[in-house]
Image: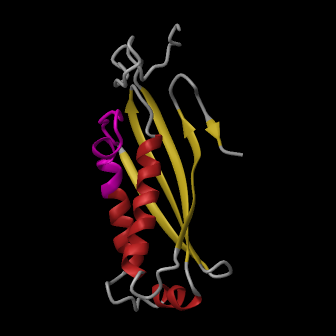
Amino acid sequence: MKMKNFSHLDKSGKAKMVYVSSKEQTLRTAEAYAEVQVSKEVFEKIKSNEVQKGDVLTVAKIAGIQAAKKTSELIPLCHNIFISSVDVTLNLNEKKKSVEIKSLAKTTAQTGIEMEALTAVSIAALTIYDMCKSLDKSIIVQEIKLLRKTGGKSGEFINP
């Protein structure tokens, strides 16, 4: 059986890191999203900054930024790239009783920055769970997704 030419597999079908040195460096951006659904009680405590572990939104923002910088240590075969910028924003959605998290990551590199943006929102969301779990363990982390990416061979992607 002949192996297809998959970029992350060697000739014997074993996992490998993709060679990117021959690729052109381009400006690349990625935006990601996650949502953390909480109870009304937890939402009010986050909103009024009354969670015992501290300022949930600030700590989650910092955790997301730190996580983006550690992505290649967490995701096998992910390249360690220079991150020009990463920002994480957290907004309280009163109607849905949720925290909406967005990240924007930028680099000029030979490979994309989508994983860094996705890691940022994922870890920010898990930080919210960790800081609030003593109040309610039924918190739901949901909707982790790439919203948009630019640059590279595949160009722009906007998630419909």
Indicate left or right for 35 with 72 as reference: right
Magenta span includes 145? no
In this view, the residue farthest toward the top is 2
Indicate left or right for 99 with 70 as reference: right
> Measured from the top left, where is residue 45 in percent x and y?
47, 90
Along the line of sight, which residue is nearer the eye, 49 or 12?
Answer: 12
In this view, the residue farthest toward the front is 1
Q: Please report the residue visible at 59 percent of the width from the left and 44 percent of the height from the top.
A: 148
Q: Please report the residue visible at 58 percent of the width from the left and 28 percent of the height from the top.
A: 155
In this view, the residue farthest toward the right is 160
Q: Is residue 135 above or below residue 23?
A: below
Q: How is the image coloured?
A: secondary structure
Q: Please report the residue visible at 33 percent of the width from the left and 90 percent of the height from the top.
A: 52
Along the line of sight, which residue is nearer the eye, 61 or 137?
Answer: 137
> Measured from the top left, where is residue 13 in percent x and y?
41, 18
> Measured from the top left, where is residue 122 in percent x and y?
45, 58
Q: Please report the residue visible at 39 percent of the width from the left and 66 percent of the height from the top.
A: 61
Indicate left or right for 19 with 138 as reference: left
Examine the image and state in which quarter residue 10 appears: top left
| Callout count | 0
Magenta segment range?
A: 66-83
> Measured from the top left, where is residue 62 in percent x and y?
33, 65
Magenta span includes 68? yes
